[in-house]
Each structure stands twice: as structure tokens, then as C-alpha cells.
């Protein structure tokens, strides 16, 4: 059983508080992009998703601090431009219980997958859609 001081330090570390040492941090750096075909001569639009999501799994003893992740679209065009949740979705998996017996979990794996749409219609013939996304942030040592 962990002491209350140990649990408090762990919670502070996950929150990025004063008990969090830079040496206990592993950086997440993910990028993903996709570009659609242009709108056809008949006005038919296209969509795309990056073929393979860009994923990173925390090493042993580390978890992903979801609240400290920074997601940006470095470039985008099309109907999804401006909607970071739809054009640069992130998913989490492999939850790890960070304080045994409490049910408090954080993920060990994060994935980023760019998604784009070209739009459609005769006024958009030849126009492509694209999304270029990045995700950065810390993994936190908890063991």
C-alpha cells in the first residue's frame, strides 16, 4: 500500500505539479497527414484518412498525461478545416492503473490520424482537401 504522501506526489506528477521532475518525462511527438483527390468534373468530392495512424506507446513505468497534450493542425483545407476534433482525431488505449486498487487509470498508448474531405460541387472542381496534424506532450513516470 502506498503512503498518502506517495499518492499525493504521484497525483501532483500526473498533474504536472511541483513534484514532477523533468527527468521523469518522456516526450510524445506525433505527426499525421493526408490529402484527398480533387473534386471530380461531375462535382463528386473525396475523403481521406492517413493510411496508418501515428502512435506512440509509453515505456514501462510511464503513462500518457492526457491533460497536457497539445494538438495542432499545421495546415488544412476543405470542409473539416477549423474542426480539430474531426480533422486531427486522437485515440487512447491500453489503460494502466496508476495507483493500485483505486481504479484510477491513464493510457499507455496514444494515436493521431489525420482526416480530410475535399468538399463537393461544381464550384470546387479540382479542389483538394488535406490535413496535417501534430501532437506533442509528456508521458509521466509513475513507477
Image (tube, rainbow, N blue to C red):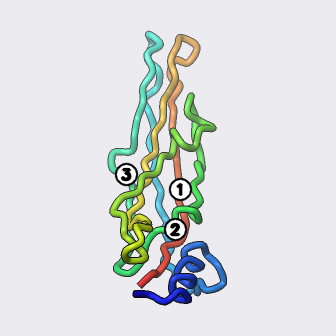
Q: Looking at the picture, does residue 19 appear above or below residue 95?
A: below
Q: Which residue is mark 3?
A: 53
Label 3, secondary structure: give it.
loop
Q: State how far apart marks 1 and 2 are (Cα).
A: 16 Å
* Near-viewer residue (46 or 10): 10
Q: Which residue is mark 1?
A: 134
Q: State how far apart marks 3 and 2 are (Cα).
A: 19 Å
Q: Looking at the picture, does residue 102 appear above or below residue 45?
A: below
Residue at the (47%, 13%) spot, across then down:
43
* Near-viewer residue (84 or 141): 141
Residue at the (47%, 57%) spot, across then down:
31
Residue at the (40%, 87%) spot, across then down:
1
* Near-viewer residue (136 or 67): 67
Bin the neighbour count of mark 3 within 10 Å (Cα to Cα): few under 14, some 14-19, many 20 and up: some
Residue at the (36%, 64%) spot, across then down:
95
Disc 1 vs disc 2: which is toward the camera? 2
Disc 3 vs disc 2: which is toward the camera? 2
Check residue 74 in the rendering and tell me which mark sits there, or answer none: none
Amino acid at each position: 500500500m502506498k503512503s498518502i504522501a506517495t499518492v499525493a506526489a504521484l497525483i501532483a506528477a500526473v498533474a504536472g505539479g511541483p513534484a514532477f521532475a523533468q527527468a521523469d518525462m518522456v516526450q510524445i511527438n506525433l505527426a499525421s497527414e493526408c490529402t484527398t483527390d480533387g473534386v471530380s468534373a461531375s462535382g463528386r468530392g473525396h475523403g481521406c484518412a492517413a493510411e496508418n495512424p501515428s502512435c506512440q506507446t509509453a515505456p514501462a513505468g510511464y503513462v500518457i498525461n492526457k491533460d497536457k497534450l497539445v494538438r495542432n493542425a499545421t495546415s488544412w483545407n476543405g470542409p473539416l478545416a477549423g474542426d480539430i476534433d474531426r480533422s486531427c482525431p486522437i485515440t487512447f488505449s491500453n489503460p494502466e492503473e496508476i495507483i493500485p486498487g483505486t481504479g484510477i487509470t491513464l493510457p499507455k498508448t496514444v494515436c493521431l490520424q489525420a482526416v480530410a474531405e475535399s468538399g463537393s460541387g461544381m464550384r470546387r472542381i479540382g479542389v483538394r482537401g488535406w490535413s496535417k496534424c501534430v501532437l506533442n506532450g509528456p508521458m509521466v513516470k509513475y513507477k
